Amino acid sequence: MRWTYPFLLLLIIALIFLLLWKSIVITIHAGEGGVLFKRWTGTVVDKVYEEGLYTIFPWDILTPYNLRVQQEKHEFDVLSKQGLTIHLKISVRFRPDKEMIGVLHQNIGPDYLESVVIPEIESVIRRYFGQFNDDELYTSKKAILEKILNDSTKQLSDKFIILDDLIVRKMEFPPTIQESIQNKITQYHKFKAYEYKVEREKLEAKRKVIEAKGISQYKDLISQSITQEYLQWAGIQATLKLSESNNAKVVIIGSAKDGLPIILNSDSNTVSNQKSK
């Protein structure tokens, strides 16, 4: 009889422990960090509970936070400077600042994606898109996105959230506007191609002028350097090479006073007075 009451007490304690198991024994899984809220003193902001198993009082709460890089896809409409409605499909990569998740938990809470990340990014995108015309948004998307990413990164860092990347997966314009913008881009590239062609023709004309001047100077130089004496010397050299050949040959000597081969004889009147030897 004396063991009945201790046994019942232990049984009651065991039952209470089983009922409160999920509130007492908390597991912080891989890639997570925990923030402890104490019922009597409040949130512990200066300590991050690392991966592992923890036991806490049932009236306290240990909240796990995913510290890995997370990705969220989102769609919404924005207005351009001209009032055109543009449908955007974006992808956001983010993660909480590990050292500051206590403050994040205290000020914002686990639903920071819906309450901070998406609204802040939407606000920045709407502000920048409202500063540009339709064709500027279509042609300068990369530069605009860099500004949006930098601004969004700063805004979220003030909320203890790290923005790794912001990707615009698709930018949908109304069909008529998109066709008009594409036509403008096509005409612009045609104009640039025409400008390039004109410039190329100008450079080709300059090249031809330079080439013509070079040929003219070359002819003047040659005409000054070739004299009668040079022609006679060249004729003698050609005759000597011909005479040294083993092939059968006939040498025709002109009747000019110098007796050079008739092919080099500058006196055209002597051609009719040749003698064959």
Image: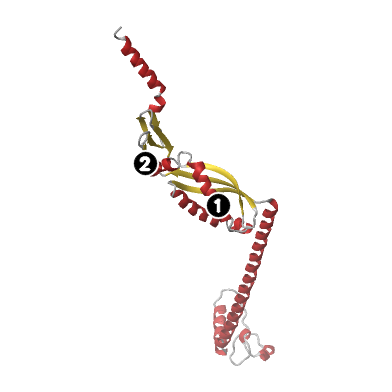
Find numbered disc 2 in the image and state the secondary structure of the residue it sits on: loop
The residue at 44%/47% (across/down) is 159
Q: Which of marks 2 and 1 is nearer the N terminus?
A: 2
The x, y position of residue 137, in whole percent, is 60, 56
Secondary element at image label 1: helix
Whether residue 95 is visible here, answered yes or no, is: yes
Q: Is residue 119 left or right of residue 22?
A: right
- Tell me the quarter of the image containing the C terminus: bottom right
Looking at the picture, tell me which residue is in the foreground, 180 or 44: 44
Depicted 70 relative to depicted 240: above or below = above
The residue type indicated by label 1 comes to Ile
From this view, report whether residue 5 is shown above or below residue 178. above
Q: Quadrant of the rendered structure where residue 63 is? A: top left
Residue extending farthest to the left is: 2
Residue ID for mark 1: 125
Query: Local crowd at mark 1 within 10 Å, few (<14), some, or many (≥20)?
Result: many
Residue furthest bottom in the image: 257
Structural distance between the alpha carbons of marks 2 and 1:
32 Å
> Can you tell which quarter of the image residue 262 is in?
bottom right
Identified by mark 2, the residue type is Val
Q: Which of 230 and 55 is in front in this view?
A: 55
Q: Mark 2 points at which residue?
A: 45
Q: Residue 52 carries which label?
A: none
Residue 248 visible: no
Residue at image coords 53%, 52% = 124
Q: Position of residue 108 (x, y in %)?
A: 45, 42
Between marks 2 and 1 in the image, the one whose residue lies nearer the viewer: 2
